[in-house]
């Protein structure tokens, strides 16, 4: 109860205020880009607007993943960002897709680039949309039931530039800067970030030696877009280097090792006559990982080793063509895309000087051909029917058999005065990452070229009530995945399709009370359950967020509550993660910020097999920032 009292006491003085910059804020609210980009037909969406992100003082994608209702932010034992649903462990990588504008951050090796992009800096992002229960047909790319869309800032709204310096109480530093210019036919936006993030150190005492568990990281993020008439060119580069955290040794005693990864891409979008749109993109990615543990690492079916190195390299080419049709009450989107996803992989085991090469050139490829369409019919101004279908054909150049996958979806959106009903039924599949399919040496991990994709059935319905002040939405969703892919230690192939089905039910209640354009309260309550009747993560959770402005101060409060659970025979008590942020606008160009995270040091904790203690996913720290517009 003390947490709730402190949370709302912080809010009480802020009911009446006079904003020194009210005209500018009114313009920002009215020109909110999410009103243009939001796709109601794509599923149930949570939106983080430009104003939300600025007042929250978010720094990286983790700050958003932590507060998405219906999900828990976690990190793996080797220091990668992951997410889980209430009662379940971490979801499969290919179940979530991350976009920057229309560019899918995919991977040849892993199916999704979350392994690299989880801690992406966000200062260049204008707004974020998170779609749950999606089929991703609406976005014209690879399938997923969870889609996170990051939309970058635009030259039209960022004329000039910005410099932001950020530091925290653990010695972390971040530098963000961007410049932009806009003309009649030509515009550009360019952004750069440098970061060095220090995190809480832990220890593991084993065999008369104290091992330090470090998860520090550093890196950079570069992005630019250039527009000339109807042509838009985007360039992106994100690189990071991070410590191994607990590593993967059998005793969780890392004595070195790290991750060194990057992804670079170029993305072209050309608007053509007759409502055609052409997109071309090319990605290069590298994932270098070394593991060192003096007390033994178990690799596939080999004897224990102490050190090994692995490197994945991806090359991805994509071409997408779409055409929009509109006639009276009818709308039709037709599209097709082709992706060539090439990869190579190699590494070595230092214990016996044995090297392995699964592929030493980019001849090992997956060709993905897809055609899709979405039809919508407006019965009247209050009722919309949606139907979509997508056919994916996977052609593998080596060992793995070709497959054909179908996605079909129907939906209905009905508005009745202040009420809205949305319902969707989807048949889809969960893509299988290439590293689980192809590995002829069966080391350092095992793969199975005969794996089948998991069919996925999703059904969801929501009831929403909205008026000028109140917005209440209840969502009920069920899904069923068949032919589960599981890891079988006794099988020579490692990954196998089991006869098990996984059924999952999700509930979410969201309430937003908008006092005025500068002050609002958002409360999300959510839960989930699975047919295995196990609780591997908190089953119930509540997110409370308060946005306020008082004179020259922007104020944000956040309380994340998660119930207790047990994992790996370790009991985690209920968590109260309280964070807050205050920004002072000295004038229209210069501002100073303060953000405290996990201030009560009682955040959600994650347990790991082989380690005796649970570890908080969010550190307790305070961030300081200064930003200047020019």
Image (cartoon, rainbow, N blue to C red):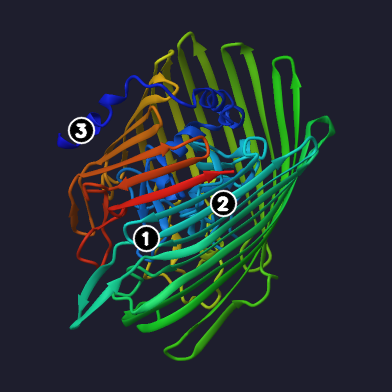
Contact (CB < 8 A) between labels 1 and 3? no
Q: Residue furthest top?
A: 417
Give the residue pinned by disc 1. Answer: 76
- Nearer the observer, 566 or 22: 22
Secondary structure beneath dot 1 equals: loop
- Report, in whole angstroms, how far the alpha carbon at label 1 lies from the one at label 3: 30 Å
* Residue at x-position 59% and y-position 35%: 408
- Return the mark for residue 177: 2
- Return the mark for residue 244: none
Front disc: 1 or 3: 3
Between disc 2 and disc 3, whose residue precedes? Answer: 3
Q: Report whether residue 245 is seen.
A: yes
> In the picture, residue 108 is in which quadrant?
bottom right
Secondary structure beneath dot 2 equals: strand
Q: Residue furthest front?
A: 587
Give the residue pinned by disc 3. Answer: 4
Name the spot of residue 39 as percent of width and height, x first.
58, 30
Q: Is residue 39 left or right of residue 524?
A: right
């Amino acid at each position: 109860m003390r947490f709730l009292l402190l949370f709302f006491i912080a809010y009480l003085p802020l009911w009446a205020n006079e904003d020194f910059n009210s005209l500018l804020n009114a313009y920002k609210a009215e020109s909110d880009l999410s009103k243009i980009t939001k796709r109601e037909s794509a599923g149930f969406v949570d939106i983080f607007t430009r104003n939300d992100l600025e007042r929250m003082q978010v720094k990286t994608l983790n700050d958003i993943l932590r507060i998405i209702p219906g999900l828990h932010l976690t990190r793996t034992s080797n220091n990668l960002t992951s997410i889980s649903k209430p009662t379940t462990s971490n979801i499969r990588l290919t179940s979530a897709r991350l976009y920057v504008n229309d560019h899918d951050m995919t991977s040849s090796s892993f199916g999704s680039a979350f392994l690299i992009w989880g801690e992406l800096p966000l200062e260049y992002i204008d707004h974020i949309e998170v779609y749950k229960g999606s089929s991703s047909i609406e976005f014209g790319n690879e399938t997923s039931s969870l889609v996170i869309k990051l939309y970058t800032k635009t030259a039209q709204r960022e004329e000039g530039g910005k410099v932001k310096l950020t530091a925290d109480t653990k010695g972390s530093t971040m530098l963000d800067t961007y410049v932009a210019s806009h003309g009649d036919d030509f515009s550009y936006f360019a952004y750069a970030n440098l970061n060095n993030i220090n995190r809480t150190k832990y220890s593991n005492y084993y065999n008369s030696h104290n091992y330090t568990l470090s998860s520090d990281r550093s890196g950079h993020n570069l992005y630019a877009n250039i527009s000339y008439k109807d042509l838009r060119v985007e360039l992106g580069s994100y690189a990071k280097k991070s410590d191994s955290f607990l590593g993967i040794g059998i005793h969780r005693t890392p004595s070195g090792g790290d991750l060194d990864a990057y992804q670079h891409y170029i993305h072209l979008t050309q608007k053509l006559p007759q409502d055609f749109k052409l997109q071309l993109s090319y990605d290069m990615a590298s994932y270098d990982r070394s593991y060192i543990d003096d007390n033994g690492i178990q690799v596939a079916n080999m004897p224990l080793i102490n050190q090994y190195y692995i490197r994945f390299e991806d090359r991805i080419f994509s071409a997408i063509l779409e055409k929009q049709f509109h006639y009276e009450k009818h709308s039709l989107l037709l599209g097709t895309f082709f992706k060539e996803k090439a990869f190579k992989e190699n590494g070595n085991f230092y214990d016996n000087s044995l090297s392995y090469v699964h592929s030493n050139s980019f001849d090992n490829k997956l060709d993905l051909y897809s055609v899709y369409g979405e039809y919508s019919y407006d019965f009247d101004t209050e009722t919309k029917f949606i139907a979509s279908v997508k056919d994916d054909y996977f052609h593998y150049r080596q060992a793995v058999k070709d497959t054909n996958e179908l996605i079909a979806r129907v939906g209905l959106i009905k508005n009745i005065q202040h009420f809205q009903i949305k319902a969707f039924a989807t048949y889809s599949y969960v893509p299988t990452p290439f590293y689980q399919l192809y590995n002829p040496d069966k080391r350092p991990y095992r793969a199975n070229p005969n794996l089948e994709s998991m069919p996925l059935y999703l059904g969801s319905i929501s009831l929403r009530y909205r008026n000028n002040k109140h917005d209440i939405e209840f969502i009920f969703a069920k899904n069923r995945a068949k032919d589960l892919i599981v890891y079988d230690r006794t099988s020579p192939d490692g990954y196998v399709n089991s006869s098990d089905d996984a059924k999952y039910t999700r509930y979410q209640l969201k309430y937003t009370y908008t006092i005025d354009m500068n002050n609002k309260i958002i409360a999300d309550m959510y839960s989930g359950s699975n047919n295995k009747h196990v609780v591997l993560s908190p089953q119930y959770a509540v997110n409370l967020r308060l946005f306020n402005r008082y004179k020259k101060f922007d104020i944000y409060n956040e309380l994340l509550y998660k119930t207790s659970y047990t994992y790996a025979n370790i009991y985690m008590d209920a968590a109260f993660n309280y964070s807050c942020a205050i920004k002072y606008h000295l004038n229209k160009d210069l501002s100073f910020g303060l953000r405290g995270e996990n201030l009560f040091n009682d955040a959600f904790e994650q347990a790991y097999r082989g380690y005796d203690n649970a570890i908080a996913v969010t550190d307790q720290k305070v961030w300081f920032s200064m930003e200047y517009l020019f």
